[in-house]
Amino acid sequence: MIPIKLILFDFQFLTREGLVKLIEGDPALELLEVLEHSDDLRHSVVKHQPDIIILDYEEQKEDLNDLLEEIILNEFPKVLVVTNRDNKKHIRKLLDLGIKGIVTKGCSKMEIINAIQSIAVGNRFFCNRILDQVMTNPQTEEVTCDPADLSPREFEVLLLITKGQRTVDIADKLNVSVHTINSHRKNILKKLNLKSPAELIVYAMESGMTKGS
């Protein structure tokens, strides 16, 4: 089995060392480099071409934001955020950036390993603590889980999104253009009165739309 190649960026010593021990203890993972300064991250990505970056996100670092946006746009390498902040504003910032994997520093070893494995194959992964924050929305009226008026194609696209499929993969599977899939995504969000893919996934799970799919 080819190991999953990782770069670890964490500016906190204790959690950084804990993650190093976790990664090095799993033969399916290969730790390429450990960083504590975001200025070194771009060079490390270019040098090592990792499968995944595991990082502690610092919102105030503009260079880190720019690099993450570039990585996410090109969908390589994949990004897993390990954070000790689980407030809704922080999570929303990560989701808006396009981060598809978030776990907290309170997660178990198995949950972090599962996150790495899921992200490596292109799936999304949010630990239970993060999902609890995403799924609770006390600032708005009670959420309804009644089925929305989606077309058969929109429903098909929705199911593929909830399975972690990328836009380009959905377009290829359905034999349509990426532009068409993006249009479907926008229409689905509008019909369901949702703002992001993460909310879309939560809606699908809560409403039971993905059961038996």
Image (spheres, rainbow, N blue to C red):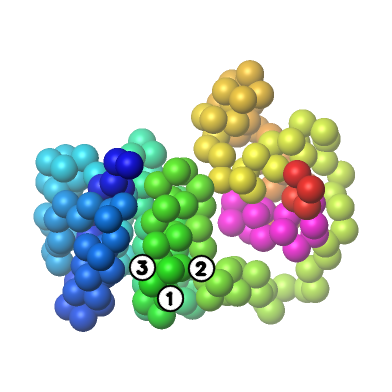
> Where on the picture, by quarter, is residue 65?
bottom left
Q: In the image, is residue 130 above or below residue 46?
A: below
Estimate the x, y position of residue 169 in percent, counting from the top left: 54, 30
Q: Earlier in the sequence, mark 2 or mark 1?
A: 1
Q: How many marks?
A: 3
Residue drawn at x 53%, y 75% is: 129
Circles 2 and 1, Cβ within 8 Å, touching? The answer is yes
Circles 3 and 1, Cβ within 8 Å, touching? The answer is yes
Any mark on residue 82, and which?
Answer: 3
Give me the C-alpha separation between circle 2 and circle 1.
8 Å
Residue drawn at x 75%, y 44% is: 213
Q: Earlier in the sequence, mark 2 or mark 3?
A: 3
Identify which residue, 113 or 191, lies in the foreground: 113
> Where on the picture, by quarter, is residue 99?
bottom left
Q: Which residue is mark 2?
A: 127
Residue lying furthest top: 175
Say what amino acid the circle numbered 3 marks. Val
Magenta-span inclusion, residue 206: yes
Residue drawn at x 25%, y 65% is: 25
Residue 56 visible to the viewer? yes
Circle 1: is it few (<14), some (14-19), or many (20+) Cα within 10 Å? some
Magenta-span inclusion, residue 57: no
Give the extent of the magenta segment. 196-209
Identify which residue, 18 or 86, lies in the foreground: 18
Between circles 3 and 1, the one closer to the viewer is 1
Identify the element where label 3 is drawn.
Answer: strand
Q: Main secondary structure of the magenta part?
A: helix
Residue 58 visible to the viewer? no
Say what amino acid the circle numbered 2 marks. Cys
Identify which residue, 165 or 149, lies in the foreground: 165
Q: Which residue is mark 1?
A: 107
Say what amino acid the circle numbered 1 marks. Cys
